[in-house]
């Protein structure tokens, strides 16, 4: 039990330290080049398109699976 508690304390300390470093960096450089909303929209559209294409291919393969066995 001591080992788990020590690991938990170490994990909390690591996360807290990283958060404090991030906040300090934000105060030093407020314009650090965060990702723009346009980039997020483009990535979401690309991932959605890829999922739609993959889903369509899966449906077509499932539909014609019996016909494709002889190929």
Image: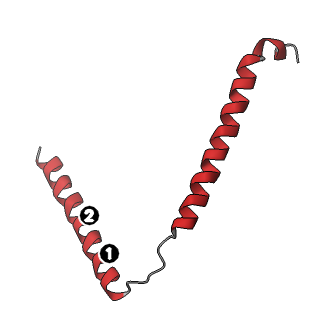
User: How far, Cα to Cα, is label 2 from label 1?
Assistant: 10 Å
Q: Is residue 59 above or below residue 3?
A: above
Secondary structure found at label 1: helix
Q: State the mark number for residue 15.
A: 2
59 on left or right of 47: right
Using the image as rendered, state which of residue 64 and residue 18 is in the foreground: 64
Using the image as rendered, state which of residue 65 and residue 18 is in the foreground: 65
**Residue shown at the point (51%, 66%) measured from the top left:** 37
Residue 45 pos. (x, y %): 61, 52
Q: Residues within 10 Å of mark 2 (few under 14, many from 20)?
A: few
Residue 17 pos. (x, y %): 24, 71
Q: State the mark number for residue 51.
A: none
**Residue shown at the point (73%, 31%) measured from the top left:** 57
11 on left or right of 56: left
Using the image as rendered, state which of residue 38 and residue 66 is in the foreground: 38
Q: Is residue 35 above or below residue 42?
A: below
- Among the two numbered marks 2 and 1 on one chain, the one whose residue lies closer to the N terminus: 2
What residue would you read off at disc 1? 22
Residue 6 pos. (x, y %): 15, 55
């Amino acid at each position: 039990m001591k080992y788990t508690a020590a690991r938990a304390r170490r994990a909390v300390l690591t996360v807290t330290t990283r958060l404090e470093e991030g906040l300090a960096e934000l105060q030093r450089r407020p314009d650090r080049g965060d990702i723009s909303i346009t980039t997020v929209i483009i990535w979401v559209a690309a991932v959605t398109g890829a999922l739609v294409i993959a889903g369509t291919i899966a449906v077509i393969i499932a539909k014609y699976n019996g016909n494709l066995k002889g190929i």
